[in-house]
Image (cartoon, rainbow, N blue to C red):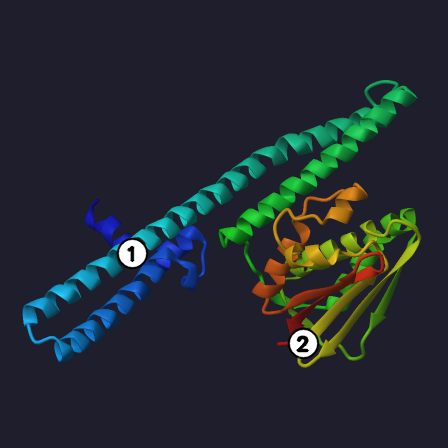
Amino acid sequence: MNSKEILSQLNIFAQCRKYGLPLWQCPQFLFLIMGIIIAVTTITSYVIANRYIADPQIVALMVLIITAILFIIASIITRSFERLAEANRMKSEFISVVSHQLRSPLSNLRWALELLISGRLGKIEEKQTEYFKILKENSARMAELVQDLLIVSRIETAKLPFKEQEFVLEDLVNDLIKEFEPFARASNVEIYFELGKNLPKAFSDPFQIRLVIENLLDNAIRYIKERGRVEIKLETRDKNFYFEIKDNGIGIPREDQKYIFQKFFRSENILRYQTQGSGLGLYIAKAIVERAGGKIGFRSQEGVGSTFWFTLPIR
């Protein structure tokens, strides 16, 4: 190992960026904290032993033994954390590479199917059209999954750019409601939007906040199994924007609620209804809201419905 690599290892902030971890979870930072604890423990042991044991050689030996044991334990723990962090980094990079590689063939497949369905390459029988539409729907689902995986990978490696700018949050919500209207009508769902008075402009990343609301609105409509309604509220509370979306869908079982923001988690009743989804939307929403300085939460009762909410600071 040359001097440059040694300096790189000693640079705690660089190592944290490499693993995509916050400072307090970084193995090198933990090792530094443990080193400080060992130093304090060693000095304390020396003071106590020196006070109660007359022989200085025994005192020195005791202090050395305690220090050695603590250092070995700290080294083992840090190495374990480092291996876990490295494995997590490699996993995120693998997902990112695979997602990038899948985007092009999926796009090509979508355009090829569009061309075939259009009939410009020759007459298509009705039965063939049905199969082409099935292929198109499944390729669209694959594209959504790849996009979600790519976003998750960028979040975990701190490579998802957060471009703050001023925008009107009300307009963003209205645009999404218009986009989801056909899906809502097809699902026999009515959408209602309640807007607070005199809302200021938001200052955040509109693309990422759009992702949050899109995921919440998609879930609210998707998990209503019969005729229903989705109620959206946007207002200000305690120097924050407060966004709430309420549905009368299948709800979330109590025993599953603690896992709801975890990656790939889908509750048992959702699987029973065979509802489509990757289990990544709420994980992405939580990561984005917290990065924007807000909070996210929910209330839910199985068979009654769910209410998801998030806040964004007003700046």
- Mark number for residue 188? none
Q: Callout 1: 10 Å neighbours few (<14), some, many (20+)? A: few
Residue 156 in the image: x percent, y percent? 52, 52
When the figure is inspected, residue 107 is found, relative to residue 36, above or below; the finding is: above
| Element assignment for label 1 | helix
The residue sitting at 81% across, 51% down in the picture is 223
Residue 87 in the image: x percent, y percent? 43, 44
172 left or right, relative to 48: right
The residue sitting at 85% across, 66% down in the picture is 193
Q: Amino acid at mark 2?
A: Asn
Residue designated by label 1: 73
User: What count of labels does the image hold?
Assistant: 2
Q: Point out the image quarter for the N terminus.
A: top left
| Element assignment for label 2 | strand
Residue 215 versus residue 265: which sits nearer the camera?
265
Tell me the distance, in whole angstroms, between the alpha carbons under discs 2 and 1: 45 Å
Residue 265 versus residue 129: which sits nearer the camera?
265
Q: Callout 2: 10 Å neighbours few (<14), some, many (20+)? A: some
185 left or right, relative to 21: right
Instruction: Find residue 17 and report its image quarter.
Output: bottom left
In the image, which is nearer the foreground, mark 2 or mark 1? 1
When the figure is inspected, residue 275 is found, relative to residue 190, above or below; the finding is: above
Examine the rendering and report whether any part of residue 210 can be seen: no
Going from the N terminus, do you reach mark 2 or mark 1 first?
Answer: 1
Q: Amino acid at mark 1?
A: Ile
The residue sitting at 40% across, 51% down in the picture is 18
Q: Are marks 2 and 1 in contact (CB under 8 Å)?
A: no
- Mark number for residue 240? 2
